[in-house]
Amino acid sequence: MATATALTLTSVTACSSSSASGSSASASDTLTVGMDGDSAANGYDPAKYTEMRQFFESVYDSLFVKTADGGVKPSLATKFAYNKDKTQLTLTLRKGVTFADGSKLTAAVVKKNLDRRNDAALVAYGNMAKGGQAEIKQVTAPDDQTVVLTFAKAQPTFQEQLASDAGMIVSAKGLADSKALGVAPYGSGPYTLEKSGSVKGSKYTMVRRKGYWNSAAFAYDTVVYRALPDPQARANALVSGQVDVAAVAGSTSSFVKSRGTGLSSLGGTVVTLPVFDKKGTVSKPFGDERVRQALQVAINRQDLVSGLHEGDKPTSNAFPSSFDGYDAALNTTWGYHPDKARKLLAEAGYAKGFSFTVITSQANQTDLEAIQKQLKAVGIDMKLKAAASTEEAFAAVSTTPLGYLAFNWPEPVVAMQAVVLGGFLNTQKATDKQLTAYTDAAAGATGAKRTEALTKLNARLVETGWLIPLYESYSYAGYNTKKVKPLTFAGNDAYPLLSSIKPAS
């Protein structure tokens, strides 16, 4: 991902409310959210992210939005229609929508947003760029309320990709000034950034925007996001009342529950080591599939879970156990086989092993230290380097061969197209014909044929070593029961929709 740009504070004023508006709300009108990281590390362009939907939902509208059951529905787009062969999508835009900077939503503005798709720094658009799995060949705006997207090949469910960061629309003013967009959002969403109540990397205060077209969908006048990357510190803030809702790590879920704090849970998150360097550009050995396979079988997942993640399930599946395509046999085929790992390394020309460096954070340090010892036993020296900044951690997708990711697979085809094949997990634009073929087959199939395609896709993801699954975990969201109603998840999305969070009374 692109590094956040350092800019002057004067640019914030154009899209921020006055300081008085943030302080006038009472505590009951304010929702404080504890986040597991800095949601605006790279500035306020939503296209620079693929997993920050909840935060950017505050200040940006998207063409479609997620529903409580995990589906999608129109938002800035009120109607949509495909042509017969699904290679063209026509959107009808909502009338009367304005951005926080006073400008209007038009088809031309939507076109300008989507026409940025070939910018490699905008990872949300990666799979829509030239050569991407959901390549948009052309965007036209025949009139002020109509946008037509023409694809390189059939895209029967493309609206699902426009219900998150990729579908969020930046105003024309924001697009015209990248520096300003680096320090303030330029959206049409329900809130605006309150500059006096915000501290970069630590706290972001959002205040209700007057005249917003869908204001009734959002319960709070003020939403405060606090970046609390340390899981225990985040849990402490939740149980002590410093935050009203928070992402809760599995390791602290029992502590949170024992203090009488509300806790909602969702299975289906696969913690995995994604291989960024599939071409061997950063570390030559990673360009060989046999080396990546050696990594698969060199890790003792059961020991990792028993020692550090009690209650979770070790897995060698890329997909969660509840998904079509999950195959228990993969847990044996790609389970712990250190002798096989040594053999694969020797076949690849690395009988004496090799070394490489990964970037660590507070959240993944302990896991990576345990894996480091396991890899060392087969001759692989994985060096650990603590991220000096959030920017360095984000840049790791391009500077290191391997990462650490809790992947919740909101929808397998969309996740493949937008994240694995065409998004931030593939900045090198590596290709694999089988992965592409199985993704395409799953996109166009239903029933048994879809299950067959997903099963093959799951197996190939593991076989190639594009993803090295570790264990299946649960997502937890904690809430103050005196202030907030029980939290719900949108389908398999690990973060509740901001619009779904409501006061307890």
Image (cartoon, rainbow, N blue to C red):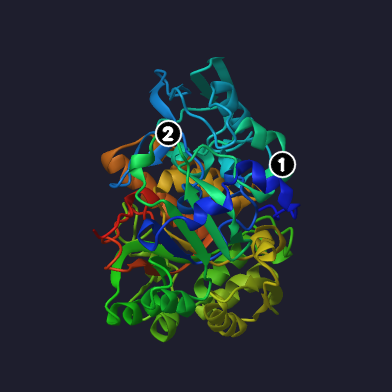
Identify the residue at horizontal 55%, vertical 79% (top origin): 371
Disc nearest the viewer among 1 and 2? 1
> Residue 245 location in percent, x, y?
38, 65
Identify the residue at horizontal 51%, vertical 28% (top origin): 153
Above or below: residue 289 compared with residue 350: above
Q: State how far apart marks 1 and 2 are (Cα).
A: 27 Å
Between 239 and 134, the one lying in front of the other is 239
Q: Which mark is residue 364?
A: none
Q: What residue is shown with label 2?
A: 159
Q: Amino acid at mark 2?
A: Gln
Q: Which quadrant, please, contains the C terminus?
A: bottom left
Give the residue furthest to the top: 142
Compare marks 1 and 2 and give the one earlier in the sequence.
2
Between 376 and 385, the one lying in front of the other is 385
Above or below: residue 237 compared with residue 404: below
Q: Amino acid at mark 1?
A: Ser
Res 120 → quadrant: top right
Callout 1 touching callout 2 (CB < 8 Å): no
Between 452 and 252, the one lying in front of the other is 252
Give the residue furthest to the left: 505
Identify the residue at horizontal 42%, vertical 86% (top origin): 307
The answer to whether residue 464 is visible is no
Identify the residue at horizontal 53%, vertical 76% (top origin): 298
* Relative to 150, 472 lies left or right: left
Q: What residue is shown with label 1?
A: 178
> Residue 197 location in percent, x, y?
57, 59
* Relative to 113, 91 lies left or right: left
The answer to whether residue 454 is visible is yes
Which element carries disc 1, helix, strand or loop?
Answer: helix
Q: Residues within 10 Å of mark 2 (few under 14, many from 20)?
A: many
